[in-house]
Image (cartoon, rainbow, N blue to C red):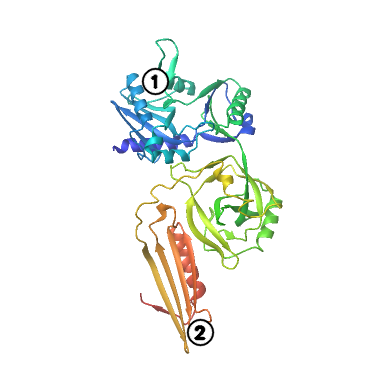
Amino acid sequence: MDTTYSNMAIGYKKNIAGKFMLVEGAKLKKYVEGEQYCVTRKIDGHLQCLFYKEGEVWMLNSQGRERASGLKCMEVFGKLAAHARLKSAVFAAELFMPREGGRPRCGDVSTALADKEQSDRLSLAVFDIIEIDGTPWQASHYCETYDKLTEILTISSDGGSGRKASPLCRPVEMRKATSKEEVQAIYEDWVEGEGAEGLVVHSESHIVWKVKPRHTIDTAIIGYTIGDRGVRDLMLAVRRGDGCFQMFAHASGGLSDDDRSSLADRLCSMHVESQYVLSDSRGIAYQMVRPEIVFEVSVIELVARGNDDKVRMNPLLIYDGQQGWLHHGMTPGVSALGLTFERERTDKTPSSTDIRLSQLTDLCPFEQQEGCMAKMESSQLLDRRIYKKVSGEKVMLHKFLIWKTNKEATGRYPAYVFYHTDYSSGRKEMIKRDMAYSCEEAQIRDIMEREITANIKKGWECLKC
């Protein structure tokens, strides 16, 4: 396929993402501004770019890849474009699975694409025009865009003045408003009343507001970094039914300076070892702690896919009272937007009941990592160093290894693994092992160098490998 189309799909996602401002529903009137509003219902689906050219229809996601073809909704789109006498067109739409008695869910799309019977029910909510007949679309207000979508994607009903849209491919639902109060009323009707995911609000401003309700989640603090005022960031996790902790966020919004200082004092006495290593934006590793403190946090949005359309992956961790945190792989999950710390929950414990995983899945069902069942590549040994020391009859060995797994795309394995074997013939526990994981080669090499510096002193011989 021509890379021009892939670049167009990728570019659209990048451009439109920069226009959005995420707003909490309760603060809608504080942030939105304008005189004439077009308010559309937010659909929880997969962003797609729809292409039509001389009767041919195809669809690319925000990574520029074709994930679906031959869907009934695409066939309907092609017929509507032909009926409107278009030579070519590029539209933006949400591909979604309608639900009876509830709003669409993003995760339903992947499930439906794998099932022919379900895929016939997939629908398109078209919300933007990118190009028509080779000319980039320009409009002074979103109302013009919506009117054009309505003209193209609906047909006259029985020859009268009314127009009819297909349930499989139609313009996204829209209402007009002339004040913030009217926008607030639409929010209360669609989101609070009908359970819609949220609103998208357009006005004369270049900003587009994405308005969603705030949700609370009880989480455990499992790690932290330090800043000038105390804790800089806190690592948060929920717990699965099998006992594993799923880390999904690190943030500190909503904490006062007193909170940061007191938490730093408490957490410094809770340090534990960890196989899992994560650095903050400064490159400083999080110090892992015992999972004892529970906080209630609030979020405006949880997303199962990023702006790159890739499934969000979360680390799975096991806490062991003697060994500390053990890395148990990666799993499909979410990332949190607009996270704020609300209060400590001293009445709750880090159990799979009090900080249960379903707090996330109820709000945003996880998606299956694409290609997770594909044939896995072989791992590659990047570095191997062995040191030996003999003292009398005692023989000591240190072996340091770095592996590139080549399996990170599956979501079940880290990108890099560091492995350390410590052998001493004169010790009761002759062999000790340690591991660390990272998604960055530079970081895993830093870990190896620190371990060598800490363990290899004078008198050790480096063996040729």
| The C terminus - image quarter | bottom left
Mark 1 lies on residue: 152
The part of the image, by quadrant, that contains residue 399 is: bottom left
Q: Is residue 113 visible?
A: yes
Q: Is residue 367 left or right of residue 243?
A: left
- Residue 58 vs residue 105, the one in the foreground: 105
| The N terminus - image quarter | top left
In the picture, the disc for residue 13 is none
As drawn, 340 above or below 263: above
As drawn, 38 above or below 113: above
- Residue 334 vs residue 70, the one in the foreground: 70
* Dot placed on the residue nearer the N-terminal end, 2 or 1: 1
Task: Classify mark 2: helix, strand or loop.
Answer: loop
User: How far apart are the two marked residues, 2 and 1, measured between alpha carbons?
Assistant: 82 Å
Mark 1 belongs to which amino acid? Ile
Image location (x, y in percent) of residue 238: 58, 51
Q: Residue at x 47, y 36 (%)?
A: 45
- Residue 212 vs residue 158, the one in the foreground: 158
Image location (x, y in percent) of residue 272: 60, 64
Mark 2 closeness class: few <14, some 14–19, many ≥20 residues within 10 Å: few
In the picture, the disc for residue 426 is 2
Task: Classify mark 1: helix, strand or loop.
Answer: helix
